Each structure stands twice: as C-alpha cells, then as structure tokens.
Amino acid sequence: MSSVIPANIGVLGAGQLGRMLALSGYPLGNRFTFLDTTGSPSAGIGEVIVDPDNQHLAAFLDRVEVVTYEFEHLPVALVREIEQHKPVYPGSRAIEVCQNRVEEKALFDRLGIPTPAYRVVESADQLEAAARELGCPVVAKSVTEGYDGKGQAVLKQPEQAQEAWQSIGHSRLIVEAFVDFVREVSMIAVRGRDGQVVFYPMAENQHVDGILRYSVAPLPDLDERVQQTADGYIRALLDELDYVGVLALELFQTRDGSLLANEMAPRVHNSGHWTMDGAVTSQFENHLRAVQGLPLGSTEATAPTCMVNVIGREGDSAALLAIGNTHLHRYDKAERPGRKLAHVNVVAETHAELLDKVRACQALLPEAPPVAWSFESTL
C-alpha cells in the first residue's frame, strides 16, 4: 500500500501557508516542491521554483506526484494545464468559483446557503443606485482579486459612490448590505478522496480593517443546532464541487442564531491556525491526508484555544513564550506594515483563563487591537 501513496507534494504558491503545510507533512515522509508565480516567495522551506513567467512548469511537474495550492489567486488556465498531467486537489473548479464573487454568490444561492442581500454593479451610477436600494451602510467589493480587505470600500451614504468606484478601480463590483451580526465565525471542513467529510468546531473571528486578528475555538455558548447548520452548508459546497482537502467558509451569525455566508476559501485558512495546538489533528495535516488519499484525522478540540495574528511588527518572543501553554509560529518574514509575520496559539483550560492569557499576549504585540469576544459576558 505504501508504494501507491504519493509522497512528493507540489504546492502552487510559496507563502506561510505552504510553509506550514510542509512542516506538518515532513512527519508523514512527504517532500515538497513549491511553484511560485509571484516572484517573491517566502516559504523558506522545501524546494522553491520561482516562475513568474511560466517557464519552468515542466521541471515542477517532474518533481511531484500530486499538486495542491496555498493561494487561490492563481491563473485558472495554469491549474487546468497542471490537471492534464498530475492530480490537483482541490480541483480547478473550486479555484475558479472562489476567484469570482459573482460565481461564488450564485453557487451559494443555488445550494440554498443564505447570504447578505447583494447587487452586482458595473458603474458608479449603478453603485449609487444599489446603495440607495439596499440602504446604507453597504460594502462594495471587487468581483475578483480582493482579499484581506483589499479591493473594498464602505459607503455610509449613496453620494460616496463615485469616490468608492474610483478607489476600488474595478469594472464590476458586488455591493452587499450590512448585517446586524452578533459575531463573525468560520467553518473549517475537510473532504477526503473517498468523500468522507470531517468538521472542526466553529471559530469566532475578530477582523480589523479586513485583516483577521483573533480566532477562538471551540465556542462555549454555541448552540449545537448552529454548528449543525454550518456543517450542512459546508458539506453541500464540498459535495457540489467534488472537493478534496480543506475548505473554509466565513459566515455572520445574527441575533436570532441564523447564519449568513460571506465567502469561502479553497485552502487551509488563517482562522484554522488554532488547530495546530488546539485540535487532535491540525488543518494542515488533514489537508495533506486528504490529497494523498489517507484516512482523515480527528478534528476534536483538545482545549480552548485562541490564535493571535502578528501583523506588521514582531513582538518579544521570549516574553510571549513565557505565557504558559503559548506557542509561537513565526514565518521568517521581514517586518512591513500590514504583513502577516507570525501567529501565536494560546491554549488554556477554561475560556476565562484563555481571555486573560490572550490579553497578556496582546499587550506584548505592537499595535495589536483589543480583544473582543461575543461571549465574554458569560465567562
């Protein structure tokens, strides 16, 4: 059996997610080759082929048995070309949908997954009309190429449409109504080659300026029916796309407990980093198990855990690690405003203890925002 399990993993993209995939795959005996199409790789691990002009694809394919990706903003044509030669998980259909917010919304609608009210616009005048129809505030997002808050603008009045249209600089936008939500949450699920699906506990996320700062799981006040609803939504996506690997689905939880889908990501996800130290099997190991056709590992949370993103500037590593049961994962990147440099996983026996430890961690990180969890009043 061991002879048919692919050990040479090709990864499209060469950032910190690929780095963490490799770190989790080495104990499985995997070898990694990264294909970087940006010209600025940062994985710092494995073999990296820098190929912004698509001149070295044959060399990449010669080194790998199965291909995955850590970054979805790739040329779909490139992924399809690779599929002609080697298995690619998840497939190109998933990446095509996730690159286009209109297609993504259409998929949600077709599968009966609720979303915030939205309109598609192709001019500043249409943007203004949509803002009036939906009622301000609204958020306008580029149909393609937007992530970590890029390609977005918030309109507090319809008259801001012209300015927002010019600032985003795209020919087609999605305009979404604001949601009166209790918290932002995310689901991480994994589907194997055989169709088996496993779900991680839902995480609560705190974003600032479109960038994730904190994720905490499991949630002490989560109704099991809400978790089951989210499981059903993400399973529908996984099955529809005949998906293999980790899929992330970001949602808003409203005051009546219902969930509205925001967007999905066809890869290991920042809001799943807590699983590296707070779950039986990390999202990274489970992704690799899936793409290699191996049995999936348990997704059970072992303790309350919070992931703290380190953005822009590093903290005092020694001081952070002096906090009990705290784990620092650095990405070997140079400091730069807005750049993800590392994350800290804080683990505790109770959520009250976890909150205290996360606030101690936050105090050691330059410019880290205050911690705010929806369930704090229940602790």
Image (cartoon, rainbow, N blue to C red):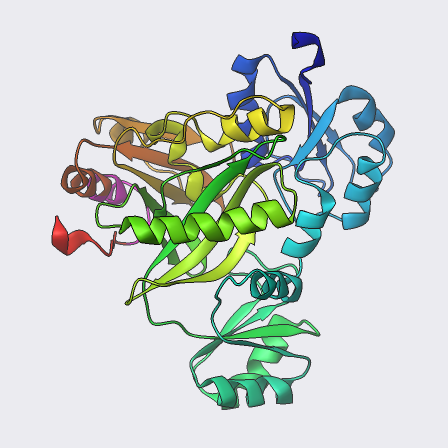
Task: Decide whether residue 363 is among the magenta residues.
Answer: yes
Q: Quadrant of the N terminus?
A: top right
Q: Is 303 displayed left or right of 272 in the figure?
A: left
Task: Decide whether residue 59 is among the magenta residues.
Answer: no
Task: Identify whether 72 is placed above or below 48.
Answer: below
Compare residues 179 and 146 and report the one nearer the observer: 179
Across and down, in percent, residue 187 comes to: 43, 47
Task: Identify whether 110 is placed above or below 220.
Answer: below
Residue at the image point whose x is 51% and y is 22% from the top: 24
Across and down, in percent, residue 40 comes to: 67, 39
Task: Identify whether 106 is placed above or below 322.
Answer: below
Whether residue 368 can be seen here: no
Across and down, in percent, residue 45 comes to: 60, 23
Compare residues 157 and 293 and report the one nearer the observer: 293
Q: Is 35 displayed left or right of 265 in the figure?
A: right
Residue 288, image quadrant: top right
Q: Residue furthest top?
A: 2
Residue at the image point whose x is 55% and y is 85% from the top: 130
- Range drawn in magenta: 359-369
Whether residue 235 can be seen here: yes
Compare residues 229 and 288 and report the one nearer the observer: 229
Residue at the image point whose x is 66% and y is 63% from the top: 103
Residue 22, image quadrant: top right
